[in-house]
Amino acid sequence: QPEFRQEAYEKLPGVMFCCMVTCDTPGMKGVCVCHEEENGEIFVPFSQGIAYVDIYTENVGISLEDEEGNRYAVSRPYEWKRLMQPGSLLTDCYAAGSRDRRLLLALFSRASRLAEKEPEEEIILYRELLALDRLAPHCRNQVMSELIRYCHEQLEGSLLEGYLEEYDLGHARREERLQILDMMLLRDMYIPAELALRKYGYIGLNLRYLQRLCSRKAAETEAPDSFLVRLCWYLFQNGKTDSVQIEYLSRYYGKKVIMRAVQSICIKSGRRRAGLDSRQRLWRNGCLGRCCLQSIS
C-alpha cells in the first residue's frame, strides 16, 4: 500500500544504519563512535560484549572505552558489521520525503558517487544540511563552498554574498580562504573582506582586487593605519599602485623612503635619466603620486 511504503521510508533511517559491534576483551565498558561530519561523539555501553550503534557516513572513528575511561582505537580487538545494507534505500527514502539527520549526512558522505543526482537536487540537499545544528565546521565550509560555486555559476548575487559572509574562514585551509577572499573583493564586499584581511593577511590574493580595496580605503582614511600602510607598501612593491596609495604612503611612511624606492626601480629598469626634469617638477609641486607613477610606469 502507498501509505505503508511512505511510512516505511520515513522510519527506515532509524534502523538501516544500525551496526553491531562485538568485543570479547575483558574490562571494556562500551564503544564510542565519532563521525567526521558532526561535532561530538556517541557512546553506547556494551551488553554482554555487544553494542548497537548507528554508522551512517564513510568517515567514522570507532574506539573502545574501558572501566577507567581509557580509549583504544586499534590496540583492543573488536568486530563490527551492518545489520542491513542501505544501498538504493538512501535515495528512495530521500525522494519519499525523509529528512532524517543521519540520512542527510549519509547522502552527503556519498555525494561523489551519487552522480545521477541533478545539480539542483544537490543544492537542495546542501541547504538542508546547513540547517543541522551539529554539523562540523569544516563540513559546513565544504557545503558552503558548493553553494557558493553554484550561486556564482547561476549569477545569484544576493545569495552568493550571503554565503560568502557566513563562510567560516577560521576553519578553512589557506587555498580555500584565498578563494573566498578573492571572491569577496571581486564583489566589492569591502567591509567583511577588510576585517578578514586584518585577521588572516593578504599575501597570495589577487593584486588587482586588493588594489581596488586599498585605494578606496586610502582615500577615506585621514589617520595613520599600520595595516593600510603595510598593504599600500605591499602593492607598491608588486607594481599595483596608484596616486592615492602613494600619497597615503608619503604621509605615513615617508616621502624619502618612497622616492628612494622609485629611484631603485628606475635604476633596475634603465630609466634613471628618462623624464628626470618632469619628475622633479612634479615633486616640487607636491604631486608625489603622479611623480612616482610617471617614474615607474
Image (tube, rainbow, N blue to C red):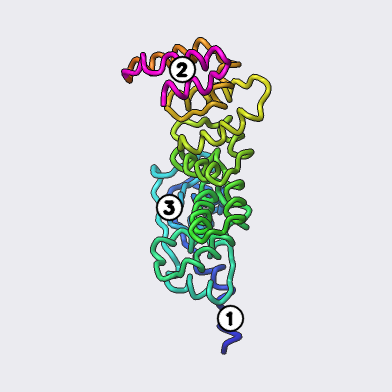
Pointer 3 residue: 24
Q: Is mark 2 on a helix, strand or loop?
A: helix
Near mark 1 (Cα within 10 A), the count class, few <14, some 14-19 or many ≥20, is some
Q: Residue 278 carries which label?
A: 2
- Amino acid, disc 1: Gln
Residue wearing tag 1: 6
Comparing 68 with 158, the one in front is 158
Residues packed near mark 3 inside 10 Å, few (<14), some (14 to 19) or many (20 plus): few
Visible in this render: residue 45?
yes
Q: Nearer the viewer, residue 191 or 171?
A: 191
Marks 2 and 3, how far apart in space? Answer: 89 Å
Work out whether residue 73 or residue 10 is closer to the camera in this orientation and state it.
Answer: 10
Q: Is residue 250 or residue 175 the one in the foreground?
A: 250
Q: Does the magenta stretch include residue 206?
A: no
Amino acid type of the residue that numbered disc 2 sits on in the rendered structure = Ser
Residue at 57% in and 15% down: 285
Q: Nearer the viewer, mark 3 or mark 1?
A: 1
Work out how far the residue at label 1 is from the one at label 2, CA to CA, in angstroms: 83 Å
The magenta region covers 270-297
The type of residue carrying mark 3 is: Asp
Label 1 SS: helix
